[in-house]
Image (cartoon, rainbow, N blue to C red):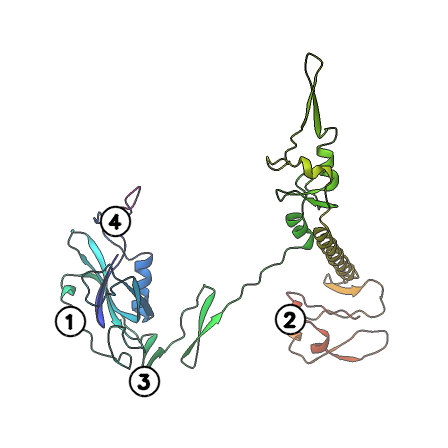
Amino acid sequence: MSLLIEFLCGCFVCSGGKDLSGNKRTNKTHSFDQKFDNMNEALRVSCQQGYPVRVVRSHKEKRSAYAPQFGVRYDGVYRIEKCWRKKGIQGCLVCRYLFVRCDNEPAPWTSDEHGDRPCPLPVVKELKGAIDVTERKKAAAWDYDEEKECWMWKRPPPPSKKMDAIRCENGISEKIKIVRKVKTKPVRDRLMKEFACLLCRKVLSVPVTTPCGHNFCKSCLEGAFSGKSFIRKRGSEGGRTLRAQKNVMKCPSCSIDIAEFLQNPEVNRHMMSAIEALLREAEMEESSEVSNDKNDENIETVNDDDGTEVSKPCDSGENVLEEIKDNDLNQPHKRRKGAGDSAIVNTEEQINVAGLEDNVMTCST
């Protein structure tokens, strides 16, 4: 892909047409024609709709007098006015684009204090003999406003799928940070992930931390080395007693000797208090879930005589509310069925519209 944008107007040769399979990432030979697909098609859509395109110029573009000396440089906002396909130097069709700078900030290579102004398009000689010529047939989404004397969105920008979206209100673009809701893991899962014994794979009970940084239950670690002595006595054939030798006791998770630690393993009190706090939090979480389930079970669904489903409380059968149909939602009031009373209740106060789907029911408490 090569960039040929010159000053305020210029042409851009797009991507594709090269065989990049295997170890050919630096292949400079076009082996087939470029097409308007993928990124090439995205640029053509920008041309048809008049969307702005941000341009970054690299120092590797030796043919341009406006390229930076080192690294890359942001050149500003451009707009694609025309695009076409024409045979290149190597005989294959290449996609070409006519870019025009339309930024409110001055170009980085000039000393101007103002941005760009609308100007007539240059005469592109290479359009002669070109095919698939595309020009914009309607007003551009990004255009110059004569009253405000600036480039701005004349139409709402396309919706963005990225975290940062652009909102346009009254022609003014505003950057919005879209925050995704991250589902928090249950406390029990956090305990199993962060405070799990490497032997029993359960939540640590009386945790001990070895010098090599691994966590075990004290009972699990002592059980792994039960029946093994710390010192091994040696003897010779002549009856002489040799010097005792320490037994090597390797950590269950690595090859470090922890024999001295096993003689008097110390409980990790800080970790133990953290685990106890998380266990209390997990119990509160489970109790709240159980209470919510019980509240849901207090309401059961029964079938009416006409086959419709009506919700009522399990422990009270005195008052049953009739089904509210979809066309009744616009009515401000609804009459309640009761034992001899004809009280009028406000449906806007009794109905949770957000939870209603096909059949909308209400329930007295």
Q: Tell me, yes or no, whether the two marked residues, 4 and 3, touch with CB atoms within 8 Å.
A: no
SS at circle 4: loop
SS at circle 2: helix
- Tag of residue 326: 2
Q: Tell me, yes or no, whether the two marked residues, 1 and 2, touch with CB atoms within 8 Å.
A: no
Q: Which residue is mark 4?
A: 18
Disc nearer the start of the sequence (3/1)? 1
Q: Which residue is mark 3?
A: 149
Disc nearer the start of the sequence (2/4)? 4
SS at circle 3: loop
Q: Residues within 10 Å of mark 1 (few under 14, many from 20)?
A: few
Viewer-nearest of discs 2 and 4:
4
Amino acid beneath label 2 = Asp
Q: Residues within 10 Å of mark 2 (few under 14, many from 20)?
A: few
Task: Give the quadrant of residue 130.
Answer: bottom left
Residue found 32% across the figure and 58% down from its top: 39
Q: Nearer the viewer, residue 106 or 42?
A: 106
Amino acid beneath label 1 = Val
- Main secondary structure along the magenta-highlighted residues: loop
